[in-house]
Amino acid sequence: MGMITRYGGRSWVWTILIMLAACSRPADSPETEIRQLVARVQVAAEERNVHDLRALIAEDYTDAWGRDRKTVENLIRLHVLRHQSIHLFARVRDIVLTDPDHATVSVAAAMAGRPVTSADQLIGLNADLYRFDLELIRRGKNDWQVLRATWEQAKLDDFW
């Protein structure tokens, strides 16, 4: 197995990007909505669309490090400015609907300087690997947002 190295500083900012959720289109189930949300976050991050990413953060967002929504918005802007090329590969590991308007989701995410289309490509790639545990809240019929988040460094095994 190849060595995984860090992709830039402050890559933890992408924790916020993977966990963010809002403006979902109607879907068959909350789980489907959340999976579609992760895919949309991935596209917005790769397009460096700060506006769409900011909209995914709940007004009352907090995390274990004491960050609020405004702090996270500023971190997103900073990360987008620092990286001209952003590529994400995400694998939803687990979704638990705790009630109709709350869910937890675990996502493994790889952040790299080039496109990644499969977990096999992560072997030996210069990428940051993280596992995000997110608490989502539904604020409308199908609008999910990130309310809380924790993250830690992931292992390659987290992507299979």
Image: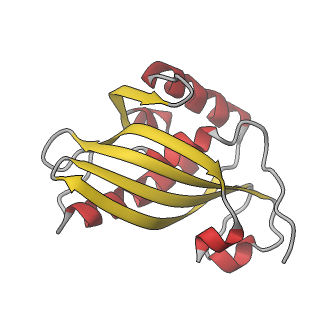
- Determine the image quadrant of residue 147: top left
Residue 146: give x, y in percent of width and height: 37, 40
Q: Residue placed farthest to the left in the image?
A: 141
Q: Quadrant of the N terminus?
A: bottom right
User: Looking at the image, what colour scheme do you see?
Assistant: secondary structure
Q: Quadrant of the C terminus?
A: bottom right
Q: Residue placed farthest to the right in the image?
A: 3
Give me the residue at 66% from left, 68% from top.
116
Q: Residue 22: tell me if it is visible.
A: no
Q: Is residue 97 above or below residue 152?
A: below
Q: Residue 67: tell me if it is visible.
A: yes
Q: Is residue 21 above or below residue 4?
A: above
Q: Is residue 123 left or right of residue 80?
A: right
Give me the residue at 27% from left, 66% from top.
32
Residue 58: give x, y in percent of width and height: 34, 31
How many marks can you see?
A: 0
